[in-house]
Image (tube, rainbow, N blue to C red):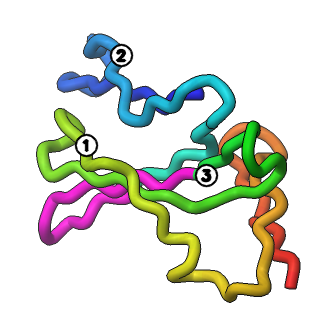
């Protein structure tokens, strides 16, 4: 599953071609993307869930990629799960109730 983006220079009148930000092979997925822009540096951060369906079914990891070029290019995604969770926690579910309404991450302790 991929994460893609399109941009508009004119408030939605026209749109760029689709650009792939994150691209994993079959069996791995990226989901639940959230973008945040650092207003001081202009860096755009894209946070998302990562899952390897073949190796660790139903286990989610948290990854981030960033762009210093207004989304024209992106860094290699980095896992930061260990930075915000404890070793005995298991991220067992991420998702959405309905469009644009995030469901809180369920952390099993």
Q: How many residues crowd around disc 2 within 10 Å: few (fewer than 14), some, or many (20 or more)? A: few
Query: Against 71, is 46 above or below?
Result: below
Front in this rendered view, residue 43 or 21: 21
Residue, far right: 108
Marker count (numbered): 3
Q: How many residues crowd around disc 1 within 10 Å: few (fewer than 14), some, or many (20 or more)? A: some
What residue does disc 3 label?
49
Front in this rendered view, residue 48 or 15: 48
- Image location (x, y in percent) of residue 74: 25, 43
Q: Secondary structure at mark 2?
A: loop
Which is closer to the viewer, label 2 or label 3? Answer: 3
Q: Is residue 99 left or right of residue 68?
A: right
Q: Is residue 75 left or right of residue 106?
A: left
In the image, residue 42 lies in the stretch drawn in magenta: yes
Q: Is residue 71 left or right of residue 59?
A: left
Residue in the image at 57% along x and 61% along y: 62
Residue in the image at 19% along x and 25% along y: 9
Magenta residues span 36-48
Query: Against 63, is 67 above or below?
Result: above
Distance CA(mark 2)–CA(mark 1): 14 Å
Distance CA(mark 1)–CA(mark 3): 17 Å
* Quadrant (top left/top right/bottom left/bottom right) for the N terminus: top right
- Image location (x, y in percent) of residue 22: 42, 35
Mark closest to the chain's N terminus, 2 or 1:
2
What residue does disc 2 label?
18
What residue does disc 1 label?
74
Q: Image quadrant of residue 52?
A: top right
Q: Secondary structure at mark 1?
A: loop
Q: Secondary structure at mark 3?
A: strand
């Amino acid at each position: 599953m991929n994460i893609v983006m399109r941009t508009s220079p004119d408030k939605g009148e026209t749109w760029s071609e689709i650009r792939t930000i994150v691209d994993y092979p079959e069996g791995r997925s990226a989901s639940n993307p959230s973008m945040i822009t650092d207003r001081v540096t202009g860096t755009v951060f894209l946070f998302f869930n990562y899952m390897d369906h073949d190796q660790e079914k139903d286990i989610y990891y948290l990854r981030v990629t960033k762009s210093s070029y207004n989304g024209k290019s992106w860094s290699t995604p980095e896992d930061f799960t260990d930075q915000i969770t404890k070793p005995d926690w298991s991220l067992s579910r991420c998702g959405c109730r309905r469009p644009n309404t995030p469901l809180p991450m369920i952390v099993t302790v």
